[in-house]
Amino acid sequence: QVQLVESGGGLVQAGGSLRLSCAASGSIFSIRRMCWFRQAPGTTPDLVATITSGGSTVTATSVKGRFTISRDNAKNTVYLQMNSLRPEDTALYYCNALANRGARDYDYWGQGTQVTVSS
């Protein structure tokens, strides 16, 4: 089992910055990759950024150059640095982990943290 707790969301003006954190606990040695998703009201979740256990990262085109995913292994925490925020970045941001248990991989989710960008 993996537990994920997000923090760092809030209200910010357009052009501002926020850093989201996702602290992992439990069977963290089994985590293969971690992602940030976001979901605005009335829409389906969008994948924002991914970081693998090997440190490779992928960022969605819509946030490339503005958002950066990183991790601190000592703190078991993944971050999403968000710069040059836009009103369209407003959403509930979720942390996701894909972890191996036995012969299968399982998805784990945090509770989400709200990001609101005012124009």
Image: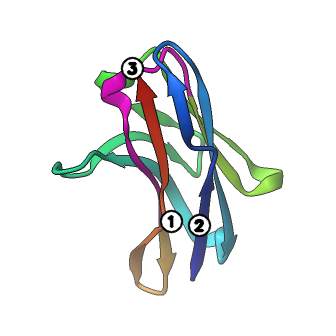
Residue 108 picture location, percent across and down: 46, 71
Q: Quadrant of residue 28?
A: bottom right
The answer to whether mark 1 and mark 2 are in CB contact below 8 A is: yes
For the residues marked 3 and 1, what is the alpha-carbon distance in whole angstroms? 24 Å
Q: Which residue appears at 60% of the width and 30% of the height?
A: 18
Q: Which residue appears at 43% of the width and 28% of the height?
A: 117
Q: Which residue appears at 42% of the width and 24% of the height?
A: 118
Identify the residue position indicated by label 3 in the image. 86
Figure coloring = rainbow
Amino acid type shown at disc 1? Gly
Residue 33 picture location, percent across and down: 50, 55
Identify the secondary structure beneath mark 3. loop
Q: Quadrant of residue 40?
A: top left
Q: Is any atom of residue 110 visible in this view?
A: yes
Q: Is any atom of residue 60 visible in this view?
A: no
Identify the secondary structure beneath mark 1. loop
Identify the residue position indicated by label 2 in the image. 4
Amino acid type shown at disc 2? Leu
